[in-house]
Image (cartoon, helix red, strand yellow):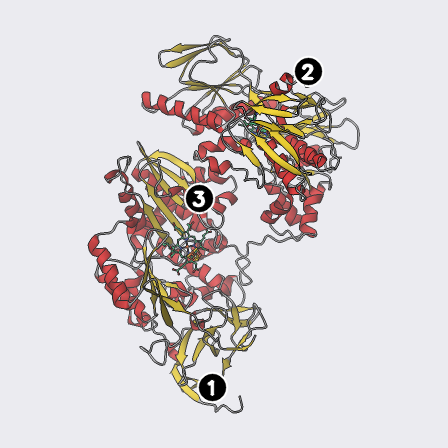
Amino acid sequence: MTRTLVVAGHGMVGHRLVEAVRAEDAEGAWRVVVLAEEPRPAYDRVALTSYVDGWDAAALDLGEHTEVELRLGDPVAKIDRAGRTVTTAGGHTESYDALVLATGSRPFVPPVPGADLPGCFVYRTIEDLDAIRAAVDSAKHRKRGRAAAMVVGGGLLGLEAAKALRDMGLSPHVVEMAPRLMPLQVDDGGGSLLRKLVTELSLTVHTGTSAERIEQDGDRLSAKLTNGTELDLDLIVFSAGVRPRDELARDAGLDVGERGGVLVDTSCRTSDPDVWAIGECAAVEGRCYGLVAPGYTMAEIVAAQLLGKEGEFPGADMSTKLKLMGVDVASFGDAHATTEGALEVVLADAVSGYYKKLVVSGDEPRTLLGGILVGDAGAYNLLRPMVGSPLPADPAAMLAPEGASGAVGVDALPDEAQICSCNSVTKGAITHAIRAQGCDSVASIKGCTKAGTTCGSCVPMLSKLLDACGVEQSKAVCEHFTHSRSELFEIVKATRITTFGELIAKHGTGAGCAICKPAVASILATVDTTEGDGGHILDGEQASLQDTNDHFLANMQRNGTYSVVPRVPGGEITPAKLKVIAEVADEFGLYTKITGGQRLDLFGATVDQLPLIWKRLVDAGFESGHAYGKALRTVKSCVGSTWCRYGVQDSVGMAVELELRYRGLRSPHKLKSAVSGCARECAEARSKDFGVIATEKGWNLYVGGNGGTLPRHAQLLVSDVDSESLIRYIDRFLMFYVRTADRLQRTAPWIEELDGGLDHLREVIVDDKLGICEELDAAMAKHVENYADEWRGVLEDPEKLARFTSFVNAPGAPDPTISFTTEREQKVPVLLGVPEVVSR
Amino acid sequence: MTTMETRTVAVCELSQLIPGRGVAALLPDGRQVAIFLTTDGECHALSNIDPFGKAAVLSRGLVGESGGQPFVASPLLKQRFDLRTGVCLDDESVVIRTYPVHIVDGVVHVSS
Ligand code: SRM
Ligand SMILES: Cc1cc2nc3c(=O)[nH]c(=O)nc-3n(C[C@H](O)[C@H](O)[C@H](O)COP(=O)(O)OP(=O)(O)OC[C@H]3O[C@@H](n4cnc5c(N)ncnc54)[C@H](O)[C@@H]3O)c2cc1C
Ligand code: SF4
Ligand code: FES
């Protein structure tokens, strides 16, 4: 008989429980009902701060359940243990056979007078962030772009909140009662370096003091600290710890822990055997855990027990690594050396800006007990799993900067070492997945083991484990070159080699193939237009390297005919030009369709017809466009301020300018863009490799979006910049991408693989950290100067033109294998019935 | 094959071929051959029809080499065919027809 499982709370842990039950309950023994307080399904709270990057809640999705009844926005108000029912605030009653409380925690707001004034916020949910954003916006509006904020709490969460405010353009004050930041995780040495590092990020740190009183001051707030400091503020965010939400349990007479939390045993059962508690609301043998990994473990063990198996909570790893941009902080194991006899080994360098401490056992062999890393947490991934094991080398050597001799590799880890603490995946499980289940990439390990799918900090380790297992994650372009695409780019740029023949003779082997030839053709073309005089892509030997679409400057369709997509920059077109396209289609008998990219596509042209069609287009002031080729495709637009009542900038004008500027640029993969005239985003700019969204003050530039199989939302690179700066940043972004990405790697995976990700990208193209911006600017300027209409180039060169014929021995003869039929009043291709195959 | 008469036709000047690319030629009986010149100067002729994509397009594919085996990759779904034997490198059960080629006084001839 089916029994009913009721889950109160749909946060990260409730979500994991339901997933685990659904995955294991093949027979459908449980009907699962989830009663949730928040108005939306569970989301990735750990990544909450990244919501500020684009205010896109969907990016935090944890995935939908199947066969689960989910009631949102209606919290459980009462448990009737005798009748085994729960009732929600909205009056809905549900009977249960098993009840799991997964109600999480609430932010702790210290009892400061005035802490409930408007302008005071907490930091836990998407709604909290929306409210903070609205307050920041209205303050900026009132005060011409400036707003002041304070964060109460200098722990892990307080610094996250400060980062969020900083990403909203503020320079917040952080107030921490303890004498140092992150008092739970770091010691004084680490704390003082941390303070220096975050101060450089324009935070103002006040330690050893707390808020004494908050008062309304006109439309602002004034806060007085216990050390006498007074701050004029627009908003205050409390992020001073959390308290378990055990109110339901208390009211129902369940036991609670001494310091709060629903008291459970190591199997996560409460004092009532039909009621369980998991996640942050649970006090396992009296202890609450404020991290997601232990919560996930509790979810898994309860799911196992519900399905008749056994499960026990093994205790948890409280290691943490701060996700704050640009500041590395990590703390793991017994970071404060509380174990008896423990010794501390410290390596600090104020000049290079790092502080590293290992805590080891007093007796030989030295067992690693814990550590603190500030400024350079590179060793965290390797050290954390080693906690509890004898150190394979001298502790000081283990702290040496990465790459230094003596530093120890992943080999040194025992099989039981937990590589992914979020999902409790051990080194052994991962190497098993690699060796026995054939995982040969980080992506396949994620799929097989779940490792790396939560906070992502263990991903570099997955890649190292692949290396250690001898799985080659080769960057080689193909069997002919051992180099990656970016290495080939550097070689071509440095040596000024201008032919494939010379490049493969000097740097490769054999004669090349369908992979390296087009890749090299693209590199030669880019180097030529951005550093040389810009030849035609079909000049000389280059003609033999191009993919068929580039060779014929049009997209081959399934029956061997081509499509022609006239370039319509920004999508703006006159009626007269529309008429020309209609006439051309009519004259050549072409199928027409509006593309998903906001252009008109003409299909079914034979090789011989292509130059004739281009001639008609060129004469009418068009050029044919790239709907093929690894180059700029479209820059879509919305009407923007010219017509739309909401528009704040001329998005069409900008789109036209961008499309004309970057057309013809050869790149590792295709490039797409869009410009929206306001935040309503009708041009879908955030699904583009570079997307531009107008703001009151200028433009926001987003990078790394795409559609396709694995859609990605572009992330904010710079905000509120003027048109000139916008174009400068896009120039640099594109040139840096073109030079360093892999073959067929779109911008999103490229950014992801950059060491340091988006922040690094920003440092390179905004702050000019590598000192290459001048060169990138010059290269793009050259590209713009060298641009020439490729299709016109063919029309003007009899030798190239001669190739546009179906048969070398019968110019003008139509290809007898091409035929069409009619569908919805237009022609469509008929494929060959009997292909000429000798054997099959 | 024995019942078929062998005919040789001149299709084009060798100078019309670009090393590393192909051209298509129409035989008198309506069949199409794809003729390729490799970068080391070899000439090969195959059926122009891609049996996977079911279209006459092979002459427009990219020519390459894998472990010394010269091939053309179909421009449709990229299956590779050995230029000498017509064997598909990605599915050896598929073999397409090859044609003998001769160069006489700078003119390419195909026999069928
Ligand atoms: C013609 C068009 C479909 C249509 O009739 O609307 C189209 C047609 C093709 N798309 Fe597309 N895509 C078209 C809009 C899109 C869009 C929508 C957009 O651009 O706003 C997308 C999602 C946005 C994106 O690219 O991020 C799109 C994502 C793809 C992808 C997936 C890319 C990815 O990163 O995952 C591929 C596969 C690839 O490029 O490797 C693809 C590949 C193709 C190919 C090249 C497949 C092929 O090899 O034949 C098709 C070429 C047809 C041809 O020869 O003309 N097409 N394709 C659209 C042309 C737009 C244009 O005006 O240039
Ligand atoms: C900004 C931020 C950053 C963080 N970073 C990290 C990190 O880097 N690493 C890490 O391990 N952890 C991190 N955490 C902590 C992590 O998010 C929590 O440990 C985790 O979300 C706990 O999951 P949970 O399901 O127990 O609680 P929650 O995710 O809080 O979910 C509880 C849910 O129950 C709902 N609820 C409460 N009462 C009721 C009721 N009566 N009826 C119905 N529903 C109810 C709540 O509304 C909520 O939706 C972070 C947290 C925040 C806020
Ligand atoms: S979605 Fe697929 S079938 Fe449709 S145009 Fe794009 S690639 Fe072709
Ligand atoms: S450690 Fe967080 S995903 Fe692996």
Judge left or right: residue A411 versus residue A527: right
Pick whichever, A796 or B58, lies toward us.
B58
Judged by depth in the image, the label closer to the viewer, 2 or 3, is 2
Element under disc 1? loop
Q: Determine which residue is flagged by label 2.
A: A258
Nearer the observer, A83 or A589: A83
Residue that badge 1 annotates: B112
Three-letter amino acid code of the residue under disc 1: Ser
Within-10-Å neighbours for mark 3: few <14, some 14–19, many 20+? many
**Marks 2 & 1 on one chain:** no
* Left or right: A637 in relation to B95: left
Dot 2 amino acid type: Glu
Instruction: Please tell me whether residue A64 is drawn above or below residue B50 in the rendered image.
Output: above
Give the residue displayed 34% in from the left and 62% down from the top.
A824
Residue A384 pos. (x, y %): 67, 34
Q: Nearer the viewer, mark 2 or mark 1?
A: 2
Compare marks 2 and 3 and give the one earlier in the sequence.
2
Quadrant of residue A813 within the rendered picture: bottom left
Ligand 1 quadrant in view: bottom left
Place of residue A315 in the rendered image (x, y in percent of width and height, measured from the top left): 71, 29
| Chain of residue at mark 2 | A
Mark 3 vs mark 1: give the one in front. Answer: 1
| Quadrant in the picture for residue A131 | top left
Spatial CA distance of label 2 from label 3 is 49 Å
Question: Which residue reaches farthest left?
Answer: A576
| Residue bearing the label numbered 3 | A704
**Chain ID of residue with mark 1:** B
**Which residue does the image show at 26% across and 65% down from the upper left?**
A586
Question: Of helix, strand and loop, which one carries label 2?
Answer: loop
Q: Residues within 10 Å of mark 1 (few under 14, many from 20)?
A: some
Residue A20, position as x, y percentages in the image: 64, 38
- Callout 3: chain: A
